[in-house]
Amino acid sequence: MSERELEARANTLKRLHNQPGVVDYKTEILDHAQIAKMLPDIGPEVVGGSYCPFDGHVNSLRLFRTLHTAIKACGVTYLPSHRVETIERQGGEFRLTTEKGAGSRGQGRAGGRQRQHAVAPLVGLLAPMKPERGQIVVTERLRPFLHYPVTTLRQTDEGTVMIGDSKEESTDPTGLTLGVSATEAERAVRQFPLLANVNVVRTWSAIRVMTKDGFPIYDESETHPGAFTVCCHSGVTLAANHALTIAPMIARGALDKSLVAPFSARRFHVQEAG
Ligand SMILES: Cc1cc2nc3c(=O)[nH]c(=O)nc-3n(C[C@H](O)[C@H](O)[C@H](O)COP(=O)(O)OP(=O)(O)OC[C@H]3O[C@@H](n4cnc5c(N)ncnc54)[C@H](O)[C@@H]3O)c2cc1C
C-alpha cells in the first residue's frame, strides 16, 4: 500500500533468496499496472506487490473434511473433547488415557495446539510455544475475482473472501478485538474497493500454534521410541512437506537427522544456555 511497504517486502524476499542452497522461487516485484493486468479489481492505492508462480492456497474447510475422511479410511477413531492426560508405552504400542477414560493405541504423535507443551513432556518431548492470536473476517460469497492468493486475502472456490493476518499476544481464543477486525477490513477495501459493499458473515479468532522462534519442531522421543512431535504454525502451507517428507519418516520409525536435525527442540536449550 506504500513504496515503503513494497521495499520492505522486496527486502524480505531478497533475504530469503540469499540463503545458501535455496531453490529459485522466481519471485518478481510488480508495479501497479502489472498487478492490474492480473487482478483487474485492484484498488488505485496499491503501489505494487510480489508474485511467485508457485504460490497456491487450499480451502481449509475442505482440507479439514478430507483429513477426517482419510483418517477414517485408515481405521483411525477420532475422539473430540477427549483430552489426553497420560501416555504409557505397553509392548510396542502407546496407551493414551483421556479425561473421559477412553484409551487408544498406536504410533504416538504428541500434538495439540497450545497444550502441546503439556502433552509433549508425557513422552519425554519438548514443544515450547508462545500465544499468538489471529483474527479472520469472512465475507458473503462473491463472484470469482481473486484468481491469485494474496497474503492477507483469499477467495475460496465457493466465493467467500477470508481477510486477515493479525497477530496479537493473547491466550484467549474466544475474544475479538474490534479495532483489529476494523483495520483488516479497511486495508482489504483499499486493496479491493469492491469489498466495500459486501456483507461480513463471520469473524473469529484463534490461537496459532506458534513455537518460540516461529519455526517448526520435528522431534522423536529418546525416552519413548516411536513418539514424535510435529509442531508448527502454517500446518496447511507445510502440509506437502509433512505428508511427503515427515510422515514417511514417522512411518519408518525414525526421523532422518540429516534433513530435520535443525528443527529439533534441542535448539531452545542452546539458545537458553547461550
Ligand atoms: C487466525 C489463523 C490463521 C491461520 N492461517 C494459516 C494459513 O494461512 N496457512 C497455514 O498453513 N496455517 C494457518 N494457520 C495455522 C493452522 O491453522 C495450523 O497450523 C493447523 O491448524 C495446525 O494443525 P494441527 O493438526 O497441527 O493442530 P490443531 O489444528 O491445533 O489440532 C490439534 C488438536 O489437538 C487437540 N488437543 C489439544 N490438546 C490435547 C490433549 N491434551 N489431548 C487430546 N487432544 C488435544 C485440540 O483440541 C485440536 O483439536 C492459521 C491459524 C490461525 C489461528
Image (spheres, rainbow, N blue to C red):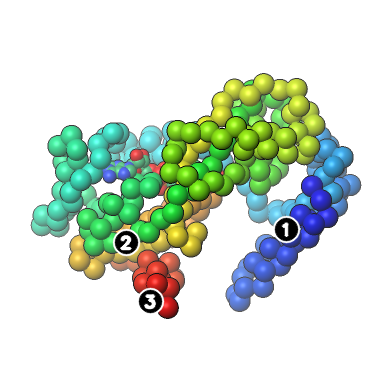
The spot of residue 263 in percent (x, y) is: 43, 67
Q: Give how far apart the Cα atoms at labels 1 and 2 are.
A: 33 Å
The answer to which of marks 1 and 2 sits earlier in the sequence is 1
Q: Which mark is residue 273?
A: 3
Task: Kindly identify the residue that appears in the image at 85 percent across and 52 percent down.
Answer: 31
Q: Name the secondary structure under disc 1.
A: helix
The spot of residue 179 in percent (x, y) is: 63, 35
Task: In the rendered view, tell whether residue 27 sits above or below residue 76.
Answer: below
The amino acid at mark 1 is Arg
The answer to which of marks 2 and 3 sits earlier in the sequence is 2
The amino acid at mark 2 is Leu
Q: Are the residues tagged 1 and 2 within 8 Å (C-beta)?
A: no
The amino acid at mark 3 is Ala
Q: Name the secondary structure under disc 2.
A: loop
Please indicate whether residue 3 sits to the left or right of residue 15 in the image.
right
Task: Please name the residue that numbered disc 1 is placed on.
Answer: 9
Please indicate whether residue 33 sits to the left or right of residue 28 in the image.
right
Q: Name the secondary structure under disc 3.
A: helix
Q: Give how far apart the Cα atoms at labels 2 and 3 are.
A: 16 Å
